[in-house]
Amino acid sequence: MRTGASIGRSLGPKLWDDFFKGSRLACARLITLVENFPESVPEIRDKLIPRQKGAIRVGITGPPGVGKSTVTAALARRAVKAGHTVGIIAVDPTSPFTGGAFLGDRVRMQSLIGDPHIFIRSMASRDGHGGLSPSTPYVADVFDAFGMDRIFIETVGVGQAELDVLTCADLIVLVLQPATGDIIQALKAGIIEAADLLLINKSDLSGTESLLESFRFLFEISARPKAIAAPPVLTASALHNKGLDEVYKEVEQLIHGHVESGRIREKKRLRLEGEMKSSVLQDLWGRFSALTNAPEEMRTAAEDLLKNGRSPYPFIRNLCARITMEIRDERTNRKDHG
Ligand SMILES: Nc1nc2c(ncn2[C@@H]2O[C@H](COP(=O)(O)OP(=O)(O)OP(=O)(O)O)[C@@H](O)[C@H]2O)c(=O)[nH]1
Ligand SMILES: [Mg+2]
């Protein structure tokens, strides 16, 4: 178990020096620190953020086994050919036995290992709602400051997992495959509305045409406002290397379009605002809990509400009023002493 002091030592000037000189080992170390020591994240990000150049984060999402990793590898290869440097974050399901990643994604991306322009990091989904590990956006921050300008984030599963990626990516590619009924799952999860590009992979299998037909029908009947265009739907066979040039071209076109229109900037701003809000709330709640017995009271109140079938709102109102009083008292105290 590492202590705060030993993390502090690991984060010494040598590590930063090596990192900013382009040492992959230092980059890997920093990612490990970000993943395993959440308390070190603010200190690390203070240094990273001024060095970031606004890398574009592309979420590759979709049901298990549709070919996300194969597609990601194909896109990464094309991005490097076009002169980009690429970071890949592949989130694997957490093993219930070891807590580690299955590394299945890494196996699919084998051909990329050793490419100096690509950095792959597999991580376990941990308890981040089964989708992304809570440290995923910070790992992307490390890649961005390291100089990667395209970051692909592959998520696992369908449902909440995909919604997680929305908050962390600038562009979303939803991958599906023919004849599995995934479209219904994706619809239920609300991910189709959020996707910037729909990709039907495994077009070598039968059922591609009927899935395309379902999409056409879906977009015709959907209540999407006229100003919002339906996302492009492309087909490819990643295994047979067919259609990927077109997919890559479309991704880059979307990126350029969304940069020009300010949409990506808006997403980044919303992300920052959301992050600030949740940090402030977490901090305030932490301080309020330390000053009062609120967590314990909440537990007792929940028991009581369950037992007696009462509404929680009176308790919530009372607690909020006490928090407001606490803030007011603090302000008055500060004025009196200042
Ligand atoms: N027939 C066919 N098989 C493919 C295609 N693309 C990928 N596969 C195969 O589908 C299987 C799953 O591919 P992956 O790339 O690991 O899929 P994934 O979505 O990343 O899987 P998870 O990360 O486990 O959810 C592998 O056996 C691939 O070889 C394709 O275009 N056609
Ligand atoms: Mg995968």
Image: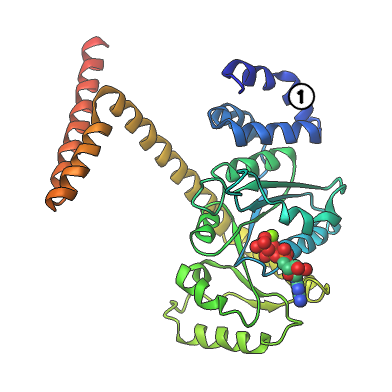
Query: Is residue 282 left or right of 129 when viewed as pictured?
Result: left
User: What's the residue at 57%, 56% (across, down)?
Assistant: 264
Q: Residue at x 40, y 41 (%)?
A: 277
Q: Nearer the viewer, residue 222 or 253?
A: 222
How many marks can you see?
1
Circle 1: residue type: Asp
With 336 as the anchor, is 118 left or right in this view?
Answer: right
Nearer-the-camera pick, 331 or 186: 186
Name above or below for residue 56 compared with residue 147.
below
Residue 44: % across, % down = 61, 29
Q: Nearer the viewer, residue 28 or 281?
A: 28
For residue 335, side relative to residue 173 (left or right): left
Q: Residue at x 83, y 72 (%)?
A: 241
Q: Counting other residues with Cα less than 10 Å from the Cα at mark 1, is it few (<14), some (14-19), or many (20 or more)?
A: few
Label 1 residue SS:
helix
Q: Is residue 254 left or right of residue 218?
A: right
Picture quarter with ligand 1: bottom right
Q: Position of residue 286 (x, y in %)?
A: 35, 29
Q: Residue 264 or 214: which is nearer the viewer?
A: 214
Protein image colouring = rainbow
> Image quadrant for the C terminus?
top left
For the question of whether residue 246 can be seen, the reply is no
Q: Which residue is mark 1?
A: 17
Q: Position of residue 329 (x, y in %)?
A: 19, 22
User: Among all residues in the image, which is located at the extreme front?
Assistant: 97
Residue 26 in view: yes
Please give the name of the residue rendered at 48% of the width and 74% of the height, measured from the top-left corner.
187
**Based on the displayed image, in which of its 4 quarters is residue 253 positioned?**
bottom right
Task: Find out if the beta carbon at label 1 lies less than 8 Å from the nearest ligand 2 atom.
Answer: no
